Image: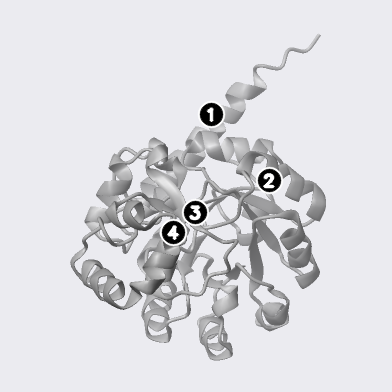
């Protein structure tokens, strides 16, 4: 068993956190991860109140273990934050924006504040906000992120924010990645793409099959899906997704896409409705190389943690005492 500040904070059996992927990390997936001994986070995304009521109810009803949710900081509305906290999550993760305006409300509700960051300046702001836990996300991650790679970013953040505990994200999909995160000074890992390809994830089966079939080289960071979906993401936060026909057609032609937006948006919404992933987005990270099947989330939690233990014991035997 691996014991860290993360496992102590939430009484976990494994130092594994489910990334709150919007539209993918629903209540059942979050509850399954929590029941397996990790920390499940519902993907609150842009804060759709109806969706949140459904999925937060499922998480609350399906587990008596700690669970939480995540929201995109720049899109938060006060009523959505109030709604989320009314379900009494153990943790609320804020990503992509200044958390200071919401920190006191979250912590006053008896909820742990988790802040996801992509560089050192954001890490310092998270500390100023009183974050209980910081997620250092490398650019290898699926979905939106920054430009710093996980391997150098994590220890730099660990040093900058000590004694606030840090967990690693981006490019982690098995026990080797979890063990590496621990060796970098992190207290656990947040995994997204690996759990997207799980039976409990809300994503459509075809999207999951594409993740299994893809390689890391099949992913790229882009703005085109945000443009066509009309989401005003800050320009420095690109999204990593699986390449498809839509991305290949519009890549480096963002101004042309904006000019054709009326018709392209209609076509994009139609593609989403029928699961046409040559047009619709599948957010996924470089870790797809390590994903060979769609599995149950509880199985993934147990195996990844066990693999990490084996790796840590193996590495310790490399040290020779004179």
Nearer mark to the viewer, of 4 and 2 = 2
Q: Which residue is mark 3?
A: 37
CA–CA distance in space, label 4 to label 2: 28 Å
Q: Are marks 3 and 4 in contact (CB under 8 Å)?
A: yes
* In this picture, residue 113 sits left or right of residue 216: right
Q: Say which residue appears at 78% left-offset and 12% top-offset.
A: 321
Nearer mark to the viewer, of 2 and 3 = 2
Nearer mark to the viewer, of 1 and 2 = 2
Quadrant that contains the N terminus: top right
- For label 3, the SS is loop
Q: Which residue is mark 2?
A: 154
Q: Position of residue 291 (x, y in %)?
A: 36, 40
Q: Which residue is mark 4?
A: 35
Q: Earlier in the sequence, mark 1 or mark 2?
A: 2
The coloring applied to the image is one colour
Residue 170 is tagged as none
Nearer mark to the viewer, of 1 and 4 = 1
Q: Which residue is mark 1?
A: 310
Q: Among all residues in the image, which is located at the extreme left?
A: 274
Q: Earlier in the sequence, mark 1 or mark 3?
A: 3
CA–CA distance in space, label 1 to label 2: 22 Å
Q: Position of residue 200 (x, y in %)?
A: 32, 59
- For label 4, the SS is helix
- For label 1, the SS is helix
Q: Are marks 1 and 3 in contact (CB under 8 Å)?
A: no
């Amino acid at each position: 068993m691996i014991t860290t500040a993360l496992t102590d904070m939430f009484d976990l059996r494994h130092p594994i956190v489910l990334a709150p992927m919007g539209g993918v990390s629903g209540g059942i997936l979050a509850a399954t991860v929590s029941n397996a001994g990790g920390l499940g986070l519902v993907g609150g995304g842009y804060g759709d109140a109806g969706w949140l009521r459904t999925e937060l109810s499922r998480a609350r009803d399906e587990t008596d273990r700690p669970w939480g949710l995540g929201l995109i900081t720049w899109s938060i509305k006060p009523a959505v934050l109030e709604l989320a906290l009314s379900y009494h999550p153990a943790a609320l993760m804020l990503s992509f924006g200044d958390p200071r305006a919401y920190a006191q409300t979250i912590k006053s509700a008896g909820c742990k504040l988790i802040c996801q960051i992509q560089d050192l300046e954001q890490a310092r702001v998270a500390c100023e906000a009183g974050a209980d836990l910081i997620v250092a996300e490398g650019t290898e991650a699926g979905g939106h992120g920054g430009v710093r790679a996980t391997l150098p970013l994590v220890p730099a953040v660990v040093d900058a924010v000590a004694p606030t505990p840090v967990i690693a994200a981006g490019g982690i999909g098995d026990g080797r990645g979890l063990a590496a995160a621990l060796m970098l000074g992190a207290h656990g890992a947040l995994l997204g793409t690996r759990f997207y390809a799980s039976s409990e994830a809300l994503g459509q089966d075809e999207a999951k099959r594409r993740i299994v079939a893809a390689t890391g080289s099949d992913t790229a960071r882009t703005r085109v899906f945000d443009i066509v979906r009309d989401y005003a993401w800050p320009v420095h936060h690109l999204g990593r997704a699986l390449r498809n026909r839509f991305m290949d057609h519009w890549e480096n032609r963002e101004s042309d896409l904006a000019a054709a937006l009326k018709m392209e948006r209609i076509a994009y919404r139609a593609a989403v409705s029928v699961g046409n992933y040559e047009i619709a987005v599948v957010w996924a990270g470089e870790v797809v190389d390590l994903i060979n099947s769609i599995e149950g989330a509880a199985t993934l939690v147990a195996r990844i943690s066990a693999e990490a233990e084996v790796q840590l014991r193996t590495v310790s035997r490399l040290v020779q005492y004179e």
